Image (cartoon, rainbow, N blue to C red):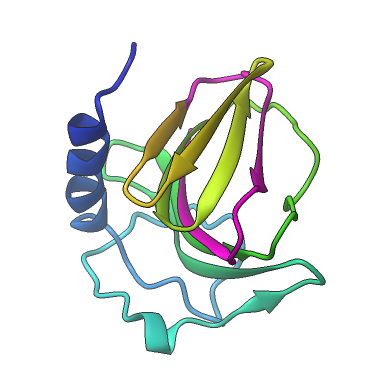
Amino acid sequence: MALTRREACMMIPALMAATASYGADEKPHSTEVLKSAIYNFKDLHVIKSADHNTYPMFEGKTHTGMAVQLHETELLLGAQPHPPHRHPAEEIFLVREGTVEVTIDGKRSDLTGGSVAYIASNALHGIRNVGNQPARYFVMQMD
C-alpha cells in the first residue's frame, strides 16, 4: 500500500499519543505498552559513531501490540549509517533537513527536507547523505 506524504505525516501524532519516554534506564527492545509522553530534543541522549549520531526517542508496543520505535539520525556528508539491508519491520524515513539518497529495492531517489519514504517489509533499503551539509531525518520502525 502506497502512502501519501500527508498520510505518513498524519501517522506520527497518532503513534506519539500512545508513547512513553525512552529513558536511559529502559531496556532496548522494550515490550512495554507505551504511554503518552513529550520528547524534548534537548533531553534526549545521543549515541555517537564516526559518521552519524542517533537520538533514540521511544521504543515499545502500542495498545494493539504493534512494536514501534522512533529515533532521529544526524548523518555527516557522504555517510551512510550502515549498508543496505532488509528486515520484516516497516519503516518510515522523514527527512528534516539536508539531502539524502534513499534506495529501495535498487531504485534510488534524492529526498530533501519535508520528504518521506515508506519502506515495506523485507524491502532492501539504505540511506546516504548526498548533500553539502549534515542531513537529519527521523526513522519510525513498526513491526
Between residue 37 and residue 117, name the one nearer to us. Answer: 117
Q: Position of residue 10 (x, y in %)?
A: 17, 41
Q: Position of residue 129 (x, y in %)?
A: 64, 51
Between residue 41 and residue 75, name the one nearer to us. Answer: 75
Q: State the residue at coordinates (49%, 52%).
A: 31
Q: Position of residue 124 (x, y in %)?
A: 68, 22
- Horizontal side, residue 105 vs residue 100: left or right: right
Residue 39, placed above or below residue 58: below
Between residue 71 and residue 111, name the one nearer to us. Answer: 111
Q: Quadrant of residue 121?
A: top right
Residue 24, placed above or below residue 86: below
Q: State the residue at coordinates (35%, 54%).
A: 33
Q: Quadrant of residue 35?
A: bottom left
Can residue 138 be found in the magenta stretch? Answer: yes
The range drawn in magenta is 119-143
Number of on-image labels: 0
Identity of the residue furthest to the bottom in this view: 42
Identity of the residue furthest to the front in this view: 132
Image quadrant in which the N terminus is located: top left
Q: Position of residue 17 (x, y in %)?
A: 18, 57
Can residue 122 be found in the magenta stretch? Answer: yes
Residue 140, placed above or below residue 6: below
Residue 138, placed above or below residue 3: below
Q: State the residue at coordinates (61%, 62%).
A: 28
Q: State the residue at coordinates (50%, 20%).
A: 120
- Horizontal side, residue 21 vs residue 93: left or right: left
- Horizontal side, residue 49 vs residue 44: left or right: right
